[in-house]
Image: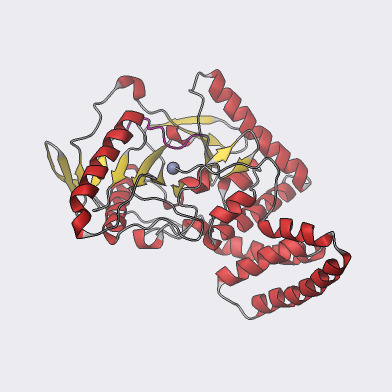
Amino acid sequence: MPTGTRRPTFVFAPVVEWRANRLQDPVAKLRFLKQASRRRAQVYDAIRLKEPWQLRIVFMAIALLFFPKHTVSDANSVYAEQLAALNLNATEKFAMVWMVDRNKGYEVYSNGLRVETKYEMPAEEKHQGVFRRYEKETLAQQQIAHPVGIIYHTTESHILPFEQAETKRMQLLGENLIYYVRGKRAYHYVIDRFGRVFRVVPENEEAYHAGYSVWANGDSVYVNLNQSFLAVSFEAQTRDADDQPTVSPAQIHSARVLTDMLRSKYRISGLNCVTHAQVSVNPSNMLIGDHTDWAGNFPFVEMGLRDNYEIPTAGLYAFGLEYDQHYMKSTGVRLWKGLVLAEEQLRQDATSHGLPLATYRRYRQNKLREMLEALKAKGAPEETN
Ligand SMILES: [Zn+2]
């Protein structure tokens, strides 16, 4: 759930700021240009030598930031290939998971998942979820009977060392956390330090977890995801950018069997299983990443999902949003691939609409404004981030 300190100015990446400062000094400028040409050679080497994609993305990002436009278009053809290679329309497989036992306080499922229900909030008509998807171009709304995705969060609560001697205190903290989450209707599910899965908010009711948020999948777009996505939160804390939250193998295992159960029950696309950092937006400055939990290091693959950090970040291509220095610092290299490919998607969409990139970006941003206005007019509660 962490929120970053927003900066009003748009900065493409930390390195741009560094570059701008350096360019004020003519001697430094010369040195920079020499260095840039060396880096350009490195970029082409990286592409030719088929370096691991992480390295290539870093070099590509450097190329985009440092080099004149003709280099950017060279790089675009590489991104277009990578975008096509993602094969986002591939048929998905779902595990078959069903409930085998339900008793006062717990449920057991065929894949070994056990859900603790003793802290679950009683059903309330007024919180009944309204699950919506919108058509990307026309914004036509379609109401659907069930949740369409999962957003993973961290609780950002106090975390003790994972040691046997701390067991009692960890149990106490975990219990306090559940009561806190109940009070805020913050998440549907919480996975505690020991991997126990607690359902707090019923799945067919709204939890207040996503704030201003967007996602897209094919021709469908989603806005303010409390109304269409379930929340699964790990009892964990984000430290700084390169030191992402640590979760235990037990937590990862539980998140995997929980995800499989929810996907099986509601036929949730794996492409709609994403982290809060990927979906959070700030409509007042049109930047993504207002919340940055799980901005890097989320165990997608360990949880039986594809690495969703590498799929194009929907806020960028579906609504023309941008990102700033703070977001770049909070995210890992894995997510940068999603950013770069989303820019490529936006460029391709602009071309197919016959519009210059900047005009198309504004057009998409206006779509988001329109949708938020429409939601407000319908009396949807104002999102708070
Ligand atoms: Zn969150």
Q: Which colour scheme is used?
A: secondary structure
Dominant secondary structure (helix, strand or loop) of the stretch shown in magenta: loop
Task: Give the percent coordinates (x, y) of residue 321.
Answer: 64, 43
Task: Give the percent coordinates (x, y) of residue 258.
Answer: 29, 49
* Residue 166 among magenta residues: no
What is the count of numbered marks?
0
Left-right relation of 348 to 103: right
Left-right relation of 118 to 42: left
Where on the image, by quarter, is ligand 1?
A: top left
Left-right relation of 229 to 315: left
Q: Can residue 87 be seen in this view?
A: no
Left-right relation of 94 to 284: left
What residue sits 60% from the left and 78% below the top?
50
- Image height of 192 relative to 284, above or below: below
Q: Can residue 27 be seen in this view?
A: yes
* Residue 208 among magenta residues: yes
What's drawn in magenta, residue-wise?
Answer: 204-211
- Image height of 307 relative to 235, above or below: below
Task: Give the percent coordinates (x, y) of residue 147.
Answer: 38, 37
Residue in front for this viewpoint, 280 or 163: 163
Residue in front for this viewpoint, 336 or 170: 170
Quarter of the image with the N terminus in it: top left
What residue sits 72% from the left and 47% below the top?
350
Task: Give the percent coordinates (x, y) of residue 105.
Answer: 14, 38
What residue sits 57% from the left and 70% below the top?
53
